[in-house]
Image (cartoon, rainbow, N blue to C red):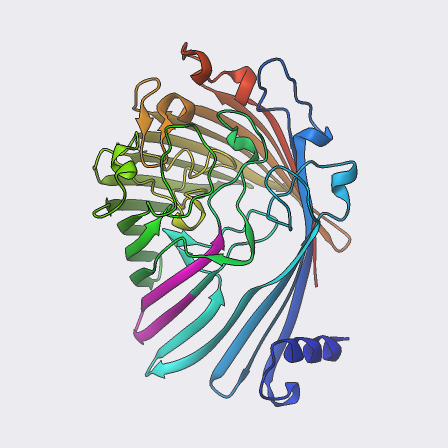
Amino acid sequence: MKKILVSVAAATMALSTTASALEDIKVSGQAKLFYETTNAGKVGTEDKSLFDKDSSTGEVAFKIGMTGKQGDVGFGATLYHTTTMGLENDVVQGVRTNTGLNDLALSGNDNTYLGEIYITAPVAPDTVLKFGKQELDTPMAFTERWNAAPNTFNSAVAINSSVENLTLIAAYVGQGNANQPHYLTTTTPPTPLTASFASSETFTSYYGTAFAVAALYKQDNFNANLWLYQINNVLGNSTLTSPTNLNIGTEAGVTVNAAWFDAGMKLGDANVKAVLAYAGHDDEGKPSTLSLTDGIKGDDTFGAALSADLKVSDITLFGAVSYVNEGDIPLANTATGFKKTMLPTQGIYTDGQYVAQPGSTAVKVSAATKLGDTALSLNAVHNMNSGNDNEVMGIQSKLAHELETTEIYATVKQKVGAFDLMGIVMHRMMDDSVKDGNNKTTDDRQGGQIVRIVASVNF
């Protein structure tokens, strides 16, 4: 069976050599069911119920990948197929990626695309170039793996390891296939609880281009990483449907200059990590709508975070705190409209859309353990914001009081036969102190429960 898979994949990629001429061929795959339901996001008198079709999203994603090499040149390819499998008939009202579907209506149910196809080749002593469509793992532009399918990038990354314990990286990123968060509701403002990102064969230039350089140092129990960025046209092709005070248009993206530094070390039995981050922007020559957008103050963003974990008996304890000043640019993933962040206070939904936003201070605590083959964790995230009620914060024009939230969630992971099962049960509480009509955010409307179930099998 493996020989057949190798031959098919090799023919699909139209390699100039035969499969038998390649070395170290490895084929792997995964099938995943992603399902989520919520009773949060109540609007007016309309109630939502857990496990109701109109309160649920989901789909099935298949992945098959192959890597190999010929001499010093390596390659990799990953094929994805996402499908509703007919779930929209009785189980869900929308999907997590753009499985051939429009935002508000189910208009198709299958999508097949190459998520990755790249080569690796030496270009200088101790230097390797990875070129093509690939996943990235950098603090301000990265692949998010929480969803049914990950986002990827058209990019070229050079990695040098000529100095002991030090890795130098230079990267060019041209495009990404994750649009800005889109919504599956018609509420005004839309509830972020149904937001996801599109991930498919269609690459949109959310940058004009992006450039990054990095120095990564690791020795014994200490590591330190420094990243410097220039990222063009951030939010320039946003498909975000949001409150009317978001005026970012097709050509109104900004050039973001960013720096990210993190360092970690072992202190006794604890692992401690610190983060310092910066993001500024240049909107020179952009349409006047950007300058008039509420939340744009022309201020640079600075952030800091500290986290630690400690194992006590069979329980791993974790705590983190983060702070972001009242600048313009969130300290999060520019590839997905700041959906996720690498700040350690991130939760499931209290993510880059909250803890990384300007004016935010967040705290996270968790405890994790294993009972036999079952992995369990209990987590709590609380995010505050220094802005006044109804004050617009940052380039995404988020209202300060809507960033005030507490999230408590438990995770359960268990292997059943060949399947890996994961369940997340969450309760969210939102600030309800605002008295301003349509802008009022209440526990009743946006808070509530969320259940996520993911079943996957790897081969």
| Quarter of the image with the C terminus in it | bottom right
Left/right of residue 220 with respect to residue 418 in the rendered view? left
Chain part drawn in magenta: 155-178
Residue at (22, 40) in percent of width and height: 300
In which image quadrant can residue 123 be found?
bottom left
Q: Position of residue 114 (x, y in %)?
A: 59, 65
Q: Position of residue 402 (x, y in %)?
A: 42, 24
In which image quadrant can residue 34 be found?
top right
Q: Is residue 161 magenta?
A: yes
Q: Is residue 427 magenta?
A: no
Q: Main secondary structure of the magenta part?
A: strand
Camera sees residue 372: no
Q: Position of residue 193 (x, y in %)?
A: 55, 31
Left/right of residue 183 with respect to residue 63 in the rendered view? left
Up/down of 96 relative to 126, above or below: above
In which image quadrant can residue 327 be found?
top left
Q: Residue furthest top?
A: 435
Q: Position of residue 357 (x, y in %)?
A: 35, 35
| Quarter of the image with the N terminus in it | bottom right
Left/right of residue 146 with respect to residue 400 in the rendered view? right
Camera sees residue 14: yes
Residue at (58, 87) in percent of width and height: 16
Left/right of residue 74 with respect to residue 307 in the rendered view? right
Count of picture labels: 0
Residue at (57, 47) in percent of width and height: 147
Residue at (62, 79) in percent of width and height: 25
Front one among 388 and 169 = 388
